Each structure stands twice: as structure tokens, then as C-alpha cells.
Amino acid sequence: MYIVTAEEMYEIDRYAIEKGGIEGKVLMENAGSQVAQQIIQAYNTNRKLAIVVGSGNNGGDGFVIARYLAEYGYNVTVFQLVADHKIKGDAAFYKQLWLNTSDKLAHVTDSHQLKQRLVDFDMVIDAILGIGVSGAIREPIRSMIDVINHLPITKISVDIPSGLPANDGIEVDLAIQADQTYIIEAPKETVFCEDTSIYYGEWETVKIGVPQAAYFEHTSRQRWCKKNVRATFPKRNKYAHKGTNGRGLVIGGQLTMPGAIVLAARAALRSGAGLITVATVKENLPIVSSSCIEATYHLLPNLTDRLTDRDLEAFEQIDAIAVGMGVGRDESQLLSDLIEKLDKPLLIDADSLYQLKPLLETQLQHEAPIVITPHYGEMAMLTDTTVPKVKRSPFSISRQFAEKYQVYVVLKGRHTVITAPNGEQIISDQGNAGLAKGGTGDVLSGILLTMIMQHKELLPALANGCYLHGKSADYLVETDHTEMDLLATDVIEGLSQVFRTLS
Ligand SMILES: NC(=O)C1=CN([C@@H]2O[C@H](COP(=O)(O)OP(=O)(O)OC[C@H]3O[C@@H](n4cnc5c(N)ncnc54)[C@H](OP(=O)(O)O)[C@@H]3O)[C@@H](O)[C@H]2O)[C@@H](O)CC1
Ligand SMILES: Nc1ncnc2c1ncn2[C@@H]1O[C@H](COP(=O)(O)OP(=O)(O)O)[C@@H](O)[C@H]1O
Ligand SMILES: [K+]
């Protein structure tokens, strides 16, 4: 499933019309009829429906919906919130079709009038503003949205809750708080941003006949689903041996944080790695090795000094490295050496992201890919911004960072945004609030390390790793656990359930 900005949606629309040969009117008819079908399936005909329409094509969709629902037997009234001359083009055409068969069109010019008129209705279909919204919401639409939000009736938005921008990064002024949104063709970026997803309520997409080729050409952002995982997940070779399933190195676990490294190492092994070596300090060896007896160990005097020739030689056999889980935030020569002296895929997480920050000022001398896995707070630190700004702009901030530093970014949150150095993006929206607990990020790093070693392409590798992690948590809260008691270690144990669904 593709995710779009407003500009991309308009390009896709244009492609459908110009190259696909589908008239704009047909797209609008399809949009309205498909949304109407969804409403028919979900809500019985006893409802008294108000459809509120604005000046653009979103309003045009509203007129089509009105016609279908009325034909089906619903009691429908259209409230036009703008002057007649504002309704043009295809929207005007469908307004006329509505008027050909119904006299239920009311003109409403202010919010008081709207409030009085809507008291008799038990559902409002919001076709006021679509993806063409720009800037602060102007009066009288502004007060009208406010009135609708305060009505104790079901609110259904068409394409996008009116007032909400499609693109990330824009501060929301005022928008319809929908119970349900029927999104036309493709989810917009704001569906997946923490501050804006709430406005959509439940959401579903409706297809209106846009050719898939339009998406290949105009967008590079998609939501990762089971079918994507199945299509890209490497098959285990019947003749595999431990050396062919990836030799991973996990570096971390200072004295006060030995657990982080155990979680990462165990998660890497559980997700299929052939061999995992844990590089940590000597004092932690008893606890760490007894918690993960399948791993091998490499002792370091501390987690910040330069790597010795002996270390570098030992790491030569390694296929990929994950560093940062419980290493502490002191300046690190070790991280510089991993970047400059070992040309292996390198995943940088947690504390090492703080150590990476000063290194960004100079070019990162690393041929093999670098993957960073920040949560919002770490991303805010890396980009000298605030957590609210990262929350508002997860797509654009990740893309800018990935392109600037030529790294892969896994920005973790309720919706995790994965970005390649070329700007291509995947959203992983598996998982639940049970994961909001210390240690789950370490588990993700371990899983990603294995995925990096086993996939040919890195972007699907990271997406599949995030899928495994989130899906494991989802299965666990459906079966043995709840969002309250779930632990990071459970997420490791839950992986086998997810693997079973993939074969
Ligand atoms: N393939 C597809 O995707 C298809 C998409 N379709 C549909 O088209 C929709 C996009 O249509 P669109 O481009 O006409 O934009 P849309 O938001 O309806 O209206 C824009 C108008 O709103 C106004 N306005 C703007 N900002 C404002 C503000 N701050 N405060 C107040 N008013 C404001 C402004 O009008 P003005 O007041 O300037 O006259 C502006 O001109 C899309 O969401 C989907 O529903 C389907 O029909 C078919 C296929
Ligand atoms: N509410 C949530 N819904 C879905 N996933 C979540 C939620 N909260 C956290 N997660 C996931 O849990 C992990 C937490 O990582 P992180 O914050 O680095 O934890 P830690 O460093 O404590 O191990 C991330 O993969 C994140 O996407
Ligand atoms: K709308």
C-alpha cells in the first residue's frame, strides 16, 4: 500500500487522467460511489444523514455520495457551505445530478445556522475540504468545523478530515475529529503521524481505478504488510550451515546495563542468525554469558577505547555489527574505529547515537551501509530539534537525514518510518503499546542485525525486522500477555509465532 503527499496524489490523479485515459469525472464518480458502498455496509438506512460540502473536489465527492445513498434509501440532505459560484467543474456537474433527482440542498452561510440545522441529524458526512487545504482555516468554515466537532453524532470524513493537511510537518490548525475516514486511493502521510492520526478515527481506503503504474512513477513510500514480508523474506536454505546464516557482532553492555546486550544477542539468534559474538567488558561476562549461552564472547577493556589489532582481526570474520545497546554516552574512539576501520554493515543504536553526533560533522568514512535506529528523542538530538517537531515531521526529517548523511534511518515509534539513503520510505505499523517498555529497542536491534545479514537488499531487510518485532508483540497481547505485562524478553520468545505465519 502506497502512502502519498498531496502533491504526489495530484500527480497520480493526473497520470490516471492523461496516461490512463480515465476522465476526472469518472474518478469522482468512482470515489463517491465507493465511499457510499462503505457507508451502506457499515450503517443502516434508518440514519438521517447530513452531507456537508465545500468548494473543491472533496465537495464533488460529497454530491456523488449523496446521490448513491439517497438511491439506496437513506434520508439525505446536502448542506452547501460555500456560495454557488465557488462550485465548479466536475463538482458542479455532480451537484446538478443531485439536483436533478432531489430538492434536498440547503445553503448554509454561518456556523449558527449550521448548528441549528444539524440538530435533527444523526450522522454527518464531511466533504468540506480535501487534500487541497492550505494555511489556517478561514471563516466561516473554521467555526463550522468547530460546530460539527461539538455535535454528539457520528462523523464520517471523505478522503481526509477537513482542515487536516495531507503532508507531515504542518502544524494542525483545526480539523474535523472523525469517527471514520474513507480515504480515497492511498493514505496520506498524516495518517501515520502521532499528532494527526487521531483525527482520522478508524480509516479505510477505497480504490477508484487509478492504475498502479501511477504509483510506481510518483511515490516512493509504502506501508509494509504481510504480503510484502512474504515476498521478500529469504527462504532458509536446506543446506544452510551456521556460517551461511550470518555471523553477527553485538557490542555493548557497560557495567550498569548488561541486559541490553543480552536482549540484542538473544533476539539476533532467535531471528535466525548463525553465529552471534558479544563484545563486552570482562566484568559482565558471567551474567551475560549465562543469559545467552548460544553466543560467543569477545572481551574489551572498556567500550570507548580504540580497537586493537587483535580486536580488528577477530572482527574480520563478522558479516554485520550492531553497537550502542548499553554502551554509555561518553565520547567513543571505538565507534570511530568501527566506522573507519571495519567495512561492515553497521547498525548504530541507543547510546552510540549520542557518540555518532559529533562524528557527523565530518564525512562518515564507511563504504558498507550504516543503519541508525533512533526513537523520537534520539532523532531530535541528532537533528538539533525538538521531540514535537520530530513527531510532526517523521517522514521529512528522516528523509533529510538519510539523504544528507547517506545512511538508513529507522525512526522508531507507534508507526516506525524506515528510510533509505535515496529517500525511499517504508512505514511499519505493527506493534502495540506493550512495546513501550525498556529493552524492546534492544530486541529490535538484534532482529535487525540478523535481517541485515540475511537479506540482499537493506530496505526490505529493515522493514521485515520491524514487522517481526511488532507482530510478535501483537500476537503476544492477543494470546498469553497484555499491553501491561509484556516484557522485551517476551517479544524475543514470540518471534516463533510470527515465523510460523510466514511459511
Ligand atoms: N485521485 C484523487 O485523489 C481524487 C480526489 N478526489 C477528491 O478531490 C479532493 C481534492 O480536491 P481539490 O483539489 O479541489 O481540493 P479540496 O480540498 O476539495 O478543496 C480546495 C478548496 O478548499 C478551499 N480551501 C483551501 N484551504 C482552505 C482554508 N484554509 N480555509 C478555507 N477554505 C480553504 C479553497 O477554496 P476557495 O475558498 O479558495 O474557493 C480551495 O480551492 C480530494 O481530497 C478528494 O476528496 C476525487 O474527487 C477524485 C479523484
Ligand atoms: N505505543 C507503541 N506502539 C507500537 N510500538 C511501540 C510503541 N512504543 C514503543 N514501540 C516500539 O518499541 C521499541 C522501543 O524502542 P526504544 O525506545 O529504543 O526502547 P529501549 O531503548 O528502551 O529498548 C521501538 O521499536 C518502537 O517502535
Ligand atoms: K473531508
Image (tube, rainbow, N blue to C red):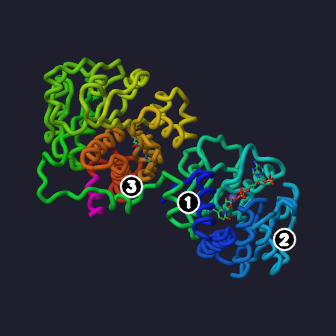
Q: Earlier in the sequence, mark 3 or mark 1?
A: 1
Q: Residue at x 50, y 64 (%)?
A: 212
Q: What numbered label is drawn on residue 186?
A: 1
Q: Earlier in the sequence, mark 2 or mark 1?
A: 2
Quarter holding the C terminus?
A: bottom left
- Residue at the disc numbered 3: 474
Question: What is the three-letter code of the residue carrying label 1?
Answer: Ala
Q: Which residues are magenta?
A: 494-503
Q: Is mark 3 within 8 Å of ligand 2?
A: no
Q: Nearer the viewer, residue 255 or 274?
A: 274
Marks 3 & 2, CB-CB < 8 Å contact: no
Residue 100 at x, y percent in the picture: 82, 80
Residue 27 at x, y percent in the picture: 64, 69
From the image, state whether disc 3 or disc 2 is nearer to you.
Answer: 2
Q: Is residue 489 above or below residue 29?
A: above
Residue 376 at x, y percent in the picture: 48, 36
| Image position of 172 (left or right of 55) | left
- SS at badge 3: helix
Q: Tell me if residue 497 is in the magenta stretch.
A: yes
Q: What numbered label is drawn on residue 362?
A: none
Q: Nearer the viewer, residue 200 or 247?
A: 247
- SS at badge 1: loop
Question: What is the three-letter code of the residue carrying label 3?
Answer: Asp
| Image position of 503 (left or right of 3) | left
From the image, state whether disc 2 or disc 1 is nearer to you.
Answer: 1
Q: What numbered label is drawn on residue 105?
A: 2
CA distance for labels 3 and 1: 24 Å
Q: Tell me if residue 176 is in the magenta stretch.
A: no
Q: Earlier in the sequence, mark 3 or mark 2?
A: 2
Q: Answer few, some or many: residues within 10 Å of disc 1's Cα (few below 14, many 20 plus, some between 14 and 19).
A: some
